[in-house]
Image (cartoon, rainbow, N blue to C red):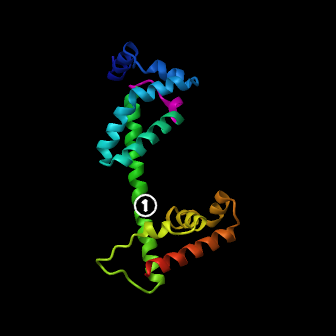
Amino acid sequence: MSSSAVSLNLIVKNPDEDFKLVEQAIGGSNEAFKELFMKNVTRVHSLCLRISADVQIAEDLTQEVFIKAWEKLNTFKFESKFSSWLHSIAVNQFLMHLRSDKRNTEKVSELNKEVFQSIDSKPPEDFRIDLQKAVDKLPGQARTVLVLHDIEGYKHSEISEMMGIQTGTSKAHLHKARKILRKELSK
C-alpha cells in the first residue's frame, strides 16, 4: 500500500472533527461557519501574530484568513485538517501582505522622488517626509484619485469607472492633489 493511500486511509478512519461543520457551512449554514471560526480564531490569530510580529497586522490578517476561507470553503478537499487548511491560508495572506507592502513602499518612494523633482529640490539626507500626513490633508476625491493612480497603479479610465466620475475629472483631481502635495512638502 502506498504512503498516500495509507495517509488517506488514516484520514477516512480519523476524520477531522471539523469536517461535519465544514460540510454544513458549504451547505449554507452560517452557524456552522461561526462555530468553525470560534474554534480556530485564536490559533489563526496567534500564527498571524508570530509571523507578522505586529498586533494590527495580525488582526487584519486574521480577518482576511476567515474571509478567504468563507469564499473558498467549497474548495476544501477534506484531505487534511481544517485547521491546517486555515494555516496555509494564513501564510499565503501574510506573503501577499508582504508583496503588497513592498509594492506600496516602492510606489510611495517613487511618488516622493517625483514630487521633489517637480519642485526642483532634493530632500536633505537626514530629512524624512511624512508623506502620509501630507496625503491625509488632501480633499477626499483628490486623495482617492492620487492613491488609486500613483500608489495603486490604476489608470484614469479605471478610476473614473470606480468613482463614477469622468476621466477628465479624475485627471483634474490628480493634478490638484499633486499641486497640493508639492506645496505641503515644500514647506
Q: Nearer the viewer, residue 65 or 95?
A: 65
Residue placed furthest toward the top? 13
- Judge whether residue 89 is colored magenta: no
Q: Quarter of the image containing the C terminus?
A: bottom left
Give the amino acid type for the residue marked by disc 1 in the picture.
Arg
Q: Residue at x 64, y 74 (%)?
A: 172
Instruction: Residue 131: give x, y in percent of width and height.
Output: 43, 69
Label 1 neighbour load within 10 Å: few <14, some 14-19, many 20+: some
Please report the bounds of the magenta region as a residue range. Answer: 72-81
Q: Identify the residue under disc 1.
A: 103
Query: In the figure, 2 relative to 40: above or below?
Result: above
Left or right position of 150 against 18: right
Instruction: Residue 119: give x, y in percent of width and height.
Output: 47, 84
Q: Nearer the viewer, residue 91 or 186?
A: 186
Q: Quadrant of residue 108?
A: bottom left
Q: Residue at x 43, y 21 (%)?
A: 18
Q: Quadrant of residue 58?
A: top left
